[in-house]
Image (tube, rainbow, N blue to C red):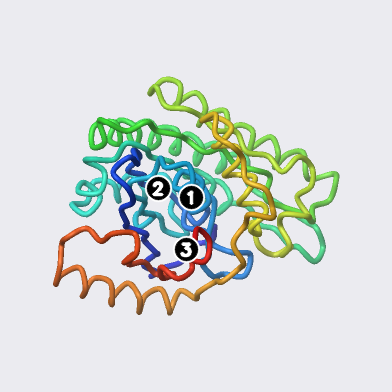
Amino acid sequence: MKKVLIVLLASFLFTSSASAKELYVALGDSLAAGQTPYAEIDNGYTDLIAMQLMRSGQLASFTKQLAFPGYTVGDVLERVQTEEARQLLKNATLVTISAGANDLLSLVSHNSATGSISYSQLTANFALNKARKDYTELLMQVNKLAPQAKVYVMGYYFPYTSVHETQIQGVKEQLSILNNILQRIAEQSEAEFVPVSFGGEEARFLPNPSDVHPNMEGYMLMANAFLEKRGLQKLSAAELPKPNPVTFKELLKQREHQQTREEKSQVAKPIEEVVGYYGYERWKRFFL
């Protein structure tokens, strides 16, 4: 969830059958975008949620265009107030949000080689309080901009695999505080909080000790936490797409190409003509 200064993320904008219901907009940080443990972008939990909704005939459209690596809660708040976001949110019926971890983890100094970790408690307290205020405003804005949407606030897993036992508890407590903040604000805003945990198997789902992003199976656990909350069938590892990551540079080029195409035609494309940074062929292999 480290800050990436300039990156334009992938967006899947497509329509399926008339019986589909959900217009799904994903908001947030690199987890919402699908960042891999090796600083690339692939299918993340939001893509897997969309995939399962599509399989069950409940998906009308999906975009993660508003999700960016490095976003804090304040960044997401600023993003949803842009004209682009207003247009995407006004008809949304489903919104998921991953925001808050960057407010906290950016203050943590972690050395994966030695297992040492440190942070300033005073600075962490200040950051968590700001995240609380920003998140309250964020949900107010999302409820205003997406009045038809059911909103889900995603919680966070413990993101470190190499930390001394003597230091691990303090960081876990700070993350617990963050999750409690997210849960309280979600409940106050009539949104659903989705707790996320790797159940003590962080090393299995976080293969790069120097990076806090999960592998595909980790994203599957996040998606399944949402699907369980919705009462939908969970995904299994056998159903996951094959990894096919793209670099941020490639995303930028594809973003520019998509914008050019969208300027030429504003007509919604049928599913066979999906325009997205990963390309329809990646989805076609999955569903057909």
Question: Which numbered disc, 1 or 2, marks the residue that appears first in the sequence?
Answer: 2
The secondary element bearing badge 1 is classed as: helix
Q: Which residue is mark 2?
A: 26
Tag 1 and tag 2, C-beta contact below 8 Å? yes
Q: Amino acid at mark 2?
A: Ala
Residue depicted at 50% across the width and 58% down the height: 287
Examine the image and state in which quarter residue 265 appears. bottom left
Three-letter code, disc 1: Thr
Residue, x 48% and y 54% (percent of image)? 47
Q: Is residue 8 above or below residue 140?
A: below
Q: Amino acid at mark 3?
A: Trp
* Residue matched to label 1: 46
Residue at 49% across / 51% down in the picture? 51
Q: Residues within 10 Å of mark 3 (few under 14, many from 20)?
A: some
- Give left or right: position of 182 versus 89: right
- Residue extending furthest right? 165
Task: Answer with left or right where residue 62 lies relative to residue 29.
Answer: left
Q: Mark 2: give few (<14), some (14-19) or many (20+) Cα within 10 Å.
A: many
Name the mark on residue 283. Answer: 3
